Amino acid sequence: MATEDKNRATAAAILPLVGGAANVSSVVHCMTRLRLGLHDRSLVQDEALKAVPAVMGVVEDDTYQIVLGPGTVARVTPEFEKLVEEGKASAPAPTAAPASAAPLTAEELAAQGAEMKAARKAKNATPFKLFLRKIANIFVPLIPALIGCGIIAGLNGLLVNLGWLTSVTPALAAMASGFMALIAVFVGYNTAKEFGGTPILGGAVAAIIVFPGVANIEAFGQKLSPGQGGVLGALGAAVLAVYVEKWCRRWVPEALDVLVTPTLTVLVSGLVTIFGLMYVAGEVSTAIGTAADWLLSNGGAGAGLILGGFFLPLVMLGLHQALIPIHTTLIEQQGYTVLLPILAMAGAGQVGAAIAVYFRLPRNESIRRTIKSALPAGFLGVGEPLIYGVSLPLGRPFITACVGGAFGGAFIGFFNQLGDAVGSTAIGPSGWALFPLVDGNHGLGVTIAIYAGGLVVGYLAGFVATYFFGFSKDLLAEFNVSQEPAASTIAATGPATVGAGPETPAKEPAGV
């Protein structure tokens, strides 16, 4: 009960600071963030929100995102939704205000707020980024199941290797594998939902891919295999189903719609999936796995250096979302994704850089307090508070954090080149939170040791690069002072930077 009271108190503290229940149009959450659709952005009190103890930071994009961290956000969101519903239910019906009660200045202020919001959204509304955002929205809801099943798979593998609880391990194997065996169905359902179709029809078409009976069908001169094409095939099949369904809605008479539309949607999309998409998507999926293995087997440290070093800028541009289907495809094919542990090194570099900032600014108690409060989350892979509260506003420390990620990625890439593959059985967590999910082609102890070594290298490289090269004389003179205004400058600069750029979920998948 105490925990429920704490979560409700957090929700109750946030609600009035975002303009109250009447200002909230939608409520969803991802791995680390409460994402709110708001009617009027100008009603939000950013600085007061950041002062709420459970709030790690705020990010403005197409939705207003409040960073609460993994675990916490899943518990606070239901309480927040209840408060919003209660607030809307108890709100009096709106009445027209007299002309004298609606001064022109208030209208002008609201118009300015709407204009600013539209301008921010326009910067992120390129077709490519909107498409990537849709892809992320398809896969992000699957992350909790991937994590849970991934941890159970790791536990089962450990018990099998030790020869313990042999009567239980088959049940654990079923729990770990059941979701992955049907993941195409969930991808199809979410895809249709995201692209504006009927979700269950997307799931029905995608289910064809995993149906055992497709083994009796021949396409392109070869027998199909259940699961061929995987999540990429399911995504393509569901998108096709949406377009077929929309076409039917336009041309099929209303009296026949309930019978004809779903039938034609499944029939047409299903035939194209069986005799085309499954084969093509299967070839693409195989190519992705082959390319990832080739890259790390041959590129090794160099490939890890580039991937680990450029992941944070990729996140800043919102392009990291393109990696989500690749991670999922690798997990479906090989049981783990070899890319995530390397990308997770970006978070290690960020932690090392923040510790260096702490020591380089001994007089700035405000920044040091921010770092001390954000470091525990940073070690667990939640990097937003450190990125937006420390390194990105300061400038150079963000670059040196990337250097730390590059060295950590090179470390893991080097061992991949030696034949010691290090992967993750799920996407989402990074930092220390990734330890229960690491897997590879050698013993668990070796895999964990390599990943831990990469973290240490990332911490050290980020620290050294930031300590010696992260500050100019002018930057030190400006911020190494015992004055609150300097910290306020960073606090004000960070959210402005965030609001101007694309979203960062991330954590959501993967590795900050």
Image (tube, rainbow, N blue to C red):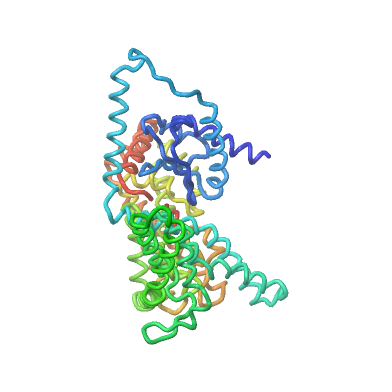
User: Is 369 or 6 nearer to us in this picture?
Assistant: 6
User: Is 364 or 152 nearer to us in this picture?
Assistant: 152
User: Is 214 or 312 nearer to us in this picture?
Assistant: 214
- Residue 119 vs 181, above or below: the answer is above
* Res. 240 image quadrant: bottom left
At a point 41% along the width and 62% down the height, the residue shown is 324
Q: How many marks?
A: 0
Outermost residue on the front side: it is 255
- Residue 155 vs 48, above or below: the answer is below
Outermost residue on the top side: it is 100
* Res. 306 image quadrant: bottom left
Question: Residue 348, can we see it?
Answer: no
User: Is 373 or 221 nearer to us in this picture?
Assistant: 221
From the image, which quarter does the N terminus lie in? top right
Question: Residue 497, can we see it?
Answer: yes
Image spot of residue 500 (x, y percent): 30, 43
**Residue 97 falls left or right of residue 204:** left
From the image, which quarter does the C terminus lie in? bottom left
Image spot of residue 69 (x, y percent): 51, 47
